[in-house]
Image: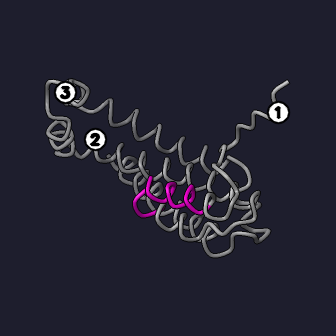
Amino acid sequence: QEFIEAGVSFDTFAPQFMWLLMIGMPRSDLTKKVMGGIVPIIGLAMVHLCIVVLAAAQEGALSQVLIFQEVFDPSMSQLGGMQKLFAFPNFVAEEWPHVLIWDLFVGRAIWLDGLEKGISTRLALTFCNFIGPPGFLIHVATCLIKGKGLTAMGYDERNES
């Protein structure tokens, strides 16, 4: 349980440094060095995987899986199923870093796209850090308003042969 707690703390606070770099110094060499590669996301994901494995090995983990099935049963309340799951500390320990790491993954993609297109991503990244997908929508709107088109986020059909 101590490692789960430490892992959650690490995956909560380590990304904030990365967000500060992308939002506060988007074009700096330090930001490009830290966030240009995927290694920081891999490191956070590895900590998350350890949390998942340790939480899954705890007593009561199977009952959480059964409740999780409710979330994907269209005849049941998805919100109700999630509320039940959030009563389990180990589910929260898995879910919170999951959200933070995926938001950072998308934030990194927004930051890279902004660098490539020469547009500011500060507002989009701030929202992405705090509430996730609306930050991505802000980036899409910024791209369209600036006449840069929809972002491909890495795929470019012009590269097809």
Q: Position of residue 150 (x, y in %)?
A: 63, 49
Calculate the distance from the C-alpha at mark 3 to the C-alpha at mark 2.
15 Å
The secondary structure type at the circle numbered 1 is helix
Using the image, tell me which numbered label, if any, was put on residue 118: none
Q: Disc 1 designates what residue?
A: 159
Q: Disc 2 designates what residue?
A: 91
Q: Marks 3 and 1: which is nearer the front?
A: 1
Q: Marks 1 and 2: which is nearer the front?
A: 1
Look at 46% across and 43% down and name the residue there: 48
Mark 1 vs 2, N-terminal side: 2
Look at 50% across and 45% down and name the residue there: 47
Quarter assignment of residue 125: bottom right
Q: Which residue is more in the foreground, 156 or 31?
A: 156
- Taking the image as shown, residue 113 lies to the left or right of residue 158, namely left
Q: Which residue is more in the foreground, 70 or 77?
A: 77
Part of the protein shown in magenta: 129-142
Calculate the distance from the C-alpha at mark 1 to the C-alpha at mark 2.
42 Å
